[in-house]
Each structure stands twice: as C-alpha cells, then as structure tokens.
Amino acid sequence: MLEEMSIRNYALIDSINLSFRSGFNVLTGETGAGKSIIVGSLSFLMGAKAEPDVIRSGCEEASVSAVISVNKNNIDVKEWLSARDIECEEDSNSVFTVIVRRNIKTTGRGSIYIQNVPVTRQDLTEFMSLLFDLHGQHNHESLLRKESHRRYLDHFAGIENEVNEFSKVFLELTEKRKTMEASLKSEKEREERLELLQYAVDEIDKAQIQAGEIRELENEVQKLSDFEKLAGLIRTASGSFFDGEQSILTLTRRVKNSLDSAAAVDSSLGDINRRVENLYYEAEDIAGDFRAYRDNLTYDPGRLEDVNERLTLLYKLRKKYAGKLEQTQTGSEEEAISAYKLNAQAEIEALSSAEENREKLKAQISSLEKSIIAKAQGLREKRNAAASKLSKTITEIMQHLGMPNARFQVKITTRGQEGSTSFGPYGTEDIEFLISANTGEALKELAKIASGGELSRVMLAIKTALLKDDNKTEETGGTETSLQVQTLVFDEIDTGIGGEVALKVGEYLAKIGKFKQIFCVTHLASIAVRADNHFKVEKRTEGGRTYTGIGPLSSDGRRKEIARMLAGDCGSAALAHADELISKYGSG
C-alpha cells in the first residue's frame, strides 16, 4: 500500500508531501488543475520512460519518492528483494516497509533506488508491477495483450504453480529432443566429424604451444630483423657509458673520488658525497648488466628463420581454431587454441559413446512425454472449467455496470493442426478474451472495442472478477499470488459514462476498495462521493509562476467539491444536491 509520496520539481509541482490511507481514494479538481501530473509522477515512480522536460522550469532535477508498506505474505516481493540482497525491516507482525526513490536531471541522466540500493529502470518497472497496477483510458495494455489473457485465466483458476511445473518439464523435454536430434546424424557424418576433431587435437598437441609464445616470438623477430640497428645503438651507448676517459662511469668515479677528499675537509659535503657515492655504485651496477647484454648480443641468421617458421605454424593454428570459439573468454590466443582442443576432446568422447547415450536419452524423453501429456490434460480441464466460470462472472458484472446486453467469453483454442496437438511452454491452449457489447454484435477482441467508456467498464469488470480470490486471501491471511497487487490506480475511468452507470462504477470501485488501496482520478461526483478519502488537485499562480498542489479535503471541503462537480459552483442548490449524494452514497 502506498503510505507516503514526495514529489519535487515535477512539471508544475514545486514540492508536495502526501500521506495516504487504505480504501477508495479519489483525486478531483478543475480541468487543467494538474490531476494528470499526479498520475504522471506516480507512473514515473513505477518505471515509465521519462524525458528531462518533466523537470520544473528553472530546476536542475525532478524527483519522486514513496514509502510503501507490503504484506509480509507477499512472497513474490520478498523473493524479488532477496534475490538482489535488498533488506527490509518489518514494521509489525503483518507488514514491512520499502522506500523507492527516482530522479531525473536536465542532462537526461537519473538514478533509482529501492531502499538504498541502486537499480535499473527495468528493475524498477518489474518490482513496482508486483505492487501497483495503473490503468487509464489509453493504458489498458495488460488487458489488451493476448499473452496476458492466459496469465489472468490461470490466476482465476489457481493453477499458476501447475503451469510453472509444466513449463519446467517442457523446457527439459525440448532440450533433450534437441540433443537426440543432434545424436541421430548419419553414421558417416559422425565418423567424418570424429576424424576431423581427432586431427585437430593431434595437430594442436604436436605443436606443444606455450602460453604467451606468440607475443614472445613476435618480439624476437623484431629484434633479429633490426639487429644491425640495435648493435649500432648498443655500441654508441657503451662508448658513452663505460668505454673511454670521458665515459659516464669514468667521470662519475672522478667526481666520487674528489668529493671523498672534499668531505674529509668540509663535513657539510657529507650528504652530497653519499648521494654521489650511491650514484656511482648504481652506475657501476648498470654498467655490469649492460656489458653482459652487449657481450651476449649475437646474430644468428638461422634463428630468425626458425622463429619465422614457428610463428607461421602458430598463426595457422590461431586462424583455424582460436576463431571458432564464439564466446572465448580466455586470457590469450594460445589458451583459446587449447580451449578448442578441450572442446574437441569432449565432443569426441560424446560422439564415441553416442549409441549408449542415445538409448538413455530415448528413455528420458519417453518419460518426459508421458509426464507432459498428463500435465497438459490437467491444465486443459482446469482452464476449461475456469473459462466458463470467468466468462459468466465478468458478463454479470458488466451487466451491472450499465451494459445489460454485453457478453464476455474466454476463448480457448487448442494449438496445432487437425488430428495433432502442439505443445507450448504453458500448455496446449491459446487463450483470448472476447466481448460483444451490444445485442446482435459478434464477439470481438478487447482491443477492437470502439468506446472508451465500454473499455473502461470491461476493464473494471475483469479486475473485479480477478480480485475475487484475492479477497478471500486477504480475509484468511493466506499467501498472495503473483498477480495480486496491493494498489490499483484508475485514471479517468469515468470517460464516456454518466448517470446510473457512473453510480454503478463508483459502487464497484468502493467494493474493491474494501480489499485494495484504490486511487481514482474522476470528474464525476457520483463516483467521488463513494470515496473513503478525497483529495483535491488545484492550480495557483504566485509571483508570476504556476504551481500545482494537492491535499485531503475536510468534510466541509468535500461537500463543496462535490457541489462544484455537480453544478460548477457552490450555490445552495448544488450544496443540497451534494448533501443528498453524500448522505445516500457516502462512505461515512
């Protein structure tokens, strides 16, 4: 449940801190007051894509944060947090608190935190979808996507765990069938492959490749190829360093001897003398190493030929084998070649024992096929039963919501061609929701409903039906399911409706509010009057700037707002009408 929300520098909002309660919450206000900004900021916090233009003019960044209380039985949320090492402290015996923060800067960059742990926008979207469900006139994606219909039906049927088990068996069977297909290559192909692999292993073994060898040989080739130049440079350096009366070493020795004598006369030269002495001994040490290098510097034309020949072999092996590993993560080219050899040896072993493995694989596949057929049959029976019940339930709700001639159907189609069944990762059925809104109209896809008002009511009917089992869960303190969110947000669900229909919509929203936290942006007094908590969104101008604000209404403030929504003013007639509605339909 959304407990608190803070919004900073978002659109026309300067700074807002809000506290919310459970039940049915409505947001009302004049057209253009900024109700959509409130919903937009919540959508931003739920992971919606955002551009820097949402930042209030003149500010560097916008931020939205929320304090959310979560039922301790919400296993999906707890597992999601645990998988990312995000810890939360339990506030009581029944809930724990999660703090979510998101900001965006004028550069387009931003940051997202769950508790104090940074997460990606994809992570945020995934996490918040476990807690919030936002619906607007143009935001019914979860209900319009056919791939979601199977999940909704399975939730209603209570078979999510069985579907997950089926998926595991399906994936295992798929992998084993792929392995069998590979093993059923012709014997000739198998022998040719074995011969090719064995040749590669022998060729690599014969080369006796050493780690780092290619780089060392390339350096040696460069040295041998430029030997004359190198030798000349060494001769010049030797003459300057230690050969002759004017060499560095000879001059350093003279300086050292002179300073030894001078330091005996003036002790203040002691420090300089020690430094020169260290310089001399260091030069002498370097000279020794340099002489050894010079004396061992020889040119062997045969060695250059041998190195080039070895490099040619290694280059050939590198081209043949190192490049064939698609995802090599080794540290050198030599290791990549060796890795190819290890893979080849493993494949040789697998191919050599292919017949024995094939028989074991056949038995495993046979067992998995029997298991998946039985599981698919069980899912099919439960889905068919649930589809009939869900169709009837949603049809009845729609009729109560002012669509007396509406029909809703959960269509189940068996996959595959005539006489054969095709298995998918979730069973053998394709699920689709169909509707006929008026008498004489054929059943159509939800996405093809023309009226926004009809679509809103269908969505509300489906939500109400799917909440049926959730309500029992809340009443009995049972374990929550993957589709059970705690907070539902309806943005302008009243589009295209009014009169008695609006009263029915308000009644259903209030009904859901008994078990869920509901937020609803509405223009209709007949819906707002049902609310447990009423917030008003207002726009004001101060100092040449425009601000959007929101706050809870007192009893009198609510009375005046209902009057305004009814008549556009707070005249005596409008107030009397508001009092009548509050008395008749208000939550008290």
Image (cartoon, grey):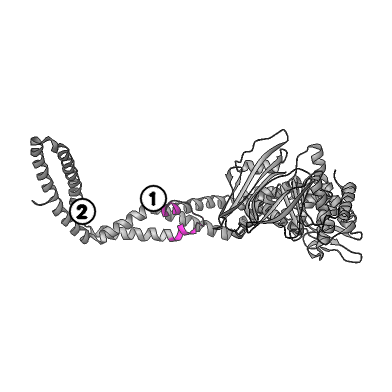
Mark 2 = which residue? 297
Q: Amino acid at mark 2?
A: Leu
Name the disc covering residue 442, or none: none
Query: Which residue occupies 39% across, 54% down?
Result: 207
Confirm whether the magenta stretch covers residue 336: yes
Q: Amino acid at mark 1?
A: Ala
How far apart, in angstroms, are the residues tagged by discs 1 and 2? Answer: 26 Å
Q: Report whether 542 appears left or right of 212.
A: right
Find numbered disc 1 in the image and state the secondary structure of the residue it sits on. Answer: loop
Count of residue discs? 2
Mark 1–mark 2 CB contact (< 8 Å): no
Residue 226 in which image quadrant: bottom left
Image location (x, y in percent) of residue 72: 71, 38
Q: Mark 1 or mark 2: which comes first in sequence? A: 1
Mark 1 = which residue? 211
73 or 330: nearer the viewer: 73
Residues drawn in magenta: 319-337
Image location (x, y in percent) of residue 130: 70, 47
Number of other residues with Cα within 10 Å of mark 1, as a class: few under 14, some 14 to 19, many 20 or more: some
Find numbered disc 2 in the image and state the secondary structure of the residue it sits on. Answer: loop
Residue 391 visible in the displayed image: no
Query: Which residue occupies 71% across, 33% down?
Result: 92
Query: Which residue occupies 51% across, 57% down?
Result: 326
Check the picture and name the quadrant holding the N terminus: top right
77 or 386: nearer the viewer: 77
Image location (x, y in percent) of residue 321: 46, 58
Confirm whether the magenta stretch covers residue 479: no
Q: Report whether 275 appears left or right of 84.
A: left
